[in-house]
Image (tube, helix red, strand yellow):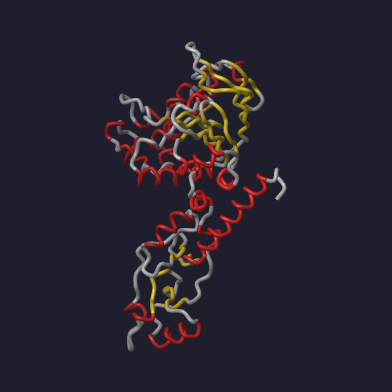
Amino acid sequence: MIRLESVSKVYPDGTAAVKDLSLEIGQGEFCIFLGPSGCGKTTSLKMINRLIPLSGGKILIDGVDTMQQNPNELRRGIGYAIQGIGLFPHLTVAENIATVPKLKGWSKAKQHSVAQELLDLVGLEPDTFIDRYPCELSGGQQQRVGVARCLGGDPPILLMDEPFGAIDPITRNRLQDEFLKIQDQLKKTIVFVTHDLNEAIKMGDKIALMRNGELMQYADPSTLLNAPKDQFVRDFIGADRVLKGLRLLRARDVMQDPPVTMRDDDDAATVRDELDRAGMQWAMVTNAQGRFLGWITADELEPGKTVGEVLIPPDVTAMPGTPLNEALSMMFNSAIGTLAVVDGKHQMIGVLSFDILRDVLGQQAADSQMAAKSDADGGVA
């Protein structure tokens, strides 16, 4: 657990970068420091591992004041990743990952083993990448190695300063997803700096929104979106906060059973009877093993042909963990505006429709209005 008690940072010229910051980050929590440039978020992060000294207040890790600890020992127990990645160009990937393990005196065999395990964890083939140098890697690959190095000494705490900020949007989204999977396995205590609200909502358990060195609101993403504390928070979140709230839900949370499912070897007459009985114009198609193959609509049915001969293959499918905002975008590319949800083996497990998402948005808007009314009434809904 990390606790900041009235922490402040004032520079010699009188600039107050952080003012009376108090908050608590629970063990295993993913905390986001969010805010515009110059709000004090990176300064606050660096004070945790004493890269920047405090001007006032205390920072305690598991109840121990960081100022009472040897700074080098403190930092060896805290993983650190930055936007510029900061890999040592003269060291191999394995040597970069083993930076902290080497300082801790681990054997070379253990260092190599850890490097292999972590490369596999971040989605890089160990045999391919372990002996390469940073200049031989793409930006996205370097970033993955940076995350692996951050985890190298198996620290309980990770500090991450806009680690995905300097890469393209597609790679960034992929790295966010993969890092969330890693966090689901490892349950580290993470402090993560970003200026990107969408990234904060997607990644964080708690969000500390800052302005001019002050903490404006500290809450989980749902509370931040549905019950902004003041006008600054509302303006920072934006008028589309209900749409942003779709990031908080996954396909598994709202998907439904398909209204009509047909087999690829069914004939046109059988499908038409099923569609008429259900009052539907389309059906989802699987094979005998339940693998999703695509869609069939009444217009595609041809006498004498099986479903498999005339079905519409899917352009996109969702996974159970797909955020609803991404699912909504996928639905616009779907053949019939409806999205199949499949598991890792492409077995069909559910369906998303615009009607389902409309109901979700309606409920979120109602929740937001209720929260606003409660705040206006002094907390009495």
Q: Residue at x 59, y 36 (%)?
A: 218
Residue at the limit of the structure toward the left, as seen here: 136
Task: Locate residue 225, reporting x and y percent.
Answer: 55, 46
**In-front residue for pair 226/131:** 226
Task: Locate residue 354, reporting x and y percent.
Answer: 47, 65
**In-front residue for pair 185/102:** 185
Q: Exactly how many numbered labels are in the figure? A: 0
Q: Residue at x 32, y 37 (%)?
A: 139
Q: Is residue 317 above or below residue 52?
A: below
Q: Is residue 261 above or below residue 203?
A: below
Q: Is residue 331 above or below residue 149?
A: below
* Left or right placement of residue 77 versus residue 333 in this view: right
**Quarter of the figure that contains the N terminus:** top right
Q: Quadrant of residue 93?
A: top left
**In-front residue for pair 199/311:** 199
Q: Is residue 169 above or below residue 334?
A: above
Task: Locate residue 90, reporting x and y percent.
Answer: 31, 24
Q: Quadrant of residue 122?
A: top left
* Left or right placement of residue 350 versus residue 62 in this view: left
Residue at the limit of the structure toward the top, as seen here: 12
Task: Locate residue 33, reporting x and y percent.
Answer: 52, 33
Residue at the limit of the structure toward the right, as seen here: 380
